[in-house]
Image (cartoon, rainbow, N blue to C red):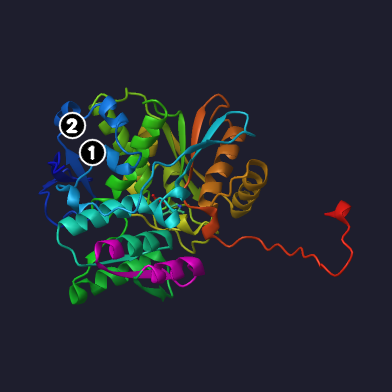
Amino acid sequence: MAQQTFVTHLECSATGERYEPDRLHNLSRAGKPLLVRYDLDAVKLAMSKDALDARAPELWRYRELLPMRRDDSIVALGEAMTPLVRLKREAGEVLVKDEGRLPTGSFKARGIALAVSMAKELGVRHVAMPTNGNAGAALAAYASRAGMRATVFCPDDTPEVNVREIAAQGARVYRVNGLIDDCGKLVARGRETTGWFDMSTLKEPYRIEGKKTMGLELAEQLGWEVPDVIFYPTGGGTGLIGMWKAFAELEAIGFIGAKRPRMVAVQASGCAPMVRAFEEGETHARRWENAHTIASGIRVPAAVGDFLILAAVRESGGYAIAVDDDAIAASLQEVATREGFLMCPEGAATHAAYRQSLRDGRIRRSDRVVLFNCATGLKYPLPPSENRLDLNAAIDFAQL
Ligand SMILES: *Cc1c(COP(=O)(O)O)cnc(C)c1O
């Protein structure tokens, strides 16, 4: 099924300046992210809800709203639609979108699958990126799948499992004595010498298109309705920006109405540049110094898409909220022991933010809420468990 793309052009997210598709792009001339634009009138004629029903339950089902010109550009590892798991112990309707089921165990697979597919289509042979762990793992996997070289830089306190999974999936990975933005500078510095393509968050146009599928999928799973509130663990903000774009596109093709969820950007109190900017009424966020949190996926002191995150949050009537590491750890433990759902710390942060928001009266119990569990909890260090039994001694079963 050779299919034509519905992409018309790329557009600077700050100035609206137009850029040609079918060419490699990083940031716009203004130094801002590029957004992919489609002929949505044509998509509206080409895509129907009934036709979707017949397609495989994977992110490629939204083909008309994805940028590849050729189907054979697609680099796939089985990107299944992720389930919405209802938390039964919450009084309100709280659904967790469990992104831990995706290839490489995190929702980074969505963005990277699209970015690598487009890189392949446009002839890239070598890709590079900075990572806190999960993006690098996804890049390693998809680049290997596509037969590309991948070079990855991560802060030296990146969890061991992430560094190893990146290496195990065929990328060159280096620990760097700095934070993620320092790693990003290495990617930029090495570009001229190596010719690698920079896959950093929002510095190429297609990761947003991959993350956008979370919004498409969510609306479809809820019967082409949006929830009342979305709690999104916000680092670079690709997912929040992507979902906001998804809802606009879905409305333009007549799949949903004008209602939008309130978008809540969740950060850790040890790294909360969006929360500070939101509260100070700023359109851009200052870099957060001495960033620290157990939720390493949202330890992002400065984001290129800061103004897009803040704009989406404000337009939606949402807000930005910080939760501390103790609340994250408590939510992680509570949801694991009471619901049987092992979240990642970033996912647990959305649960902690939900609880805090209920207490503060920022949301209502009657709201239909979606939390994001962005990675499998199994990728993170787990608390020790030390119980042992000696088969040569008497066992008091009543005490077990
Ligand atoms: C990357 C990442 C995030 C942040 O996602 P963005 O869309 O970049 O804000 C949150 N949690 C985990 C586990 C991640 O890997």
Marker count (numbered): 2
Residue 60 within the segment the image draws in magenta: no
Assess disc 2: are there few (<14), some (14-19) or many (≥20) residues with their C-alpha within 10 Å of its C-alpha. some
Left or right relative to 346: residue 37: left
* Residue located 40% across and 67% down the image: 166
Which residue bears the numbered disc 2? 43
When the figure is inspected, residue 46 is found, relative to residue 206, above or below; the finding is: above
* Residue located 45% across and 47% down the image: 99
When the figure is inspected, residue 157 is found, relative to residue 363, above or below; the finding is: below
Which x, y percent locates residue 19? 12, 49
- Give the residue type at disc 1: Leu
**Callouts 2 and 1 close, C-beta under 8 Å:** yes
* Residue located 37% across and 67% down the image: 169
- Give the residue type at disc 2: Val
Which residue bears the numbered disc 1? 65
When the figure is inspected, residue 52 is found, relative to residue 60, above or below; the finding is: above
Left or right relative to 362: residue 399: right
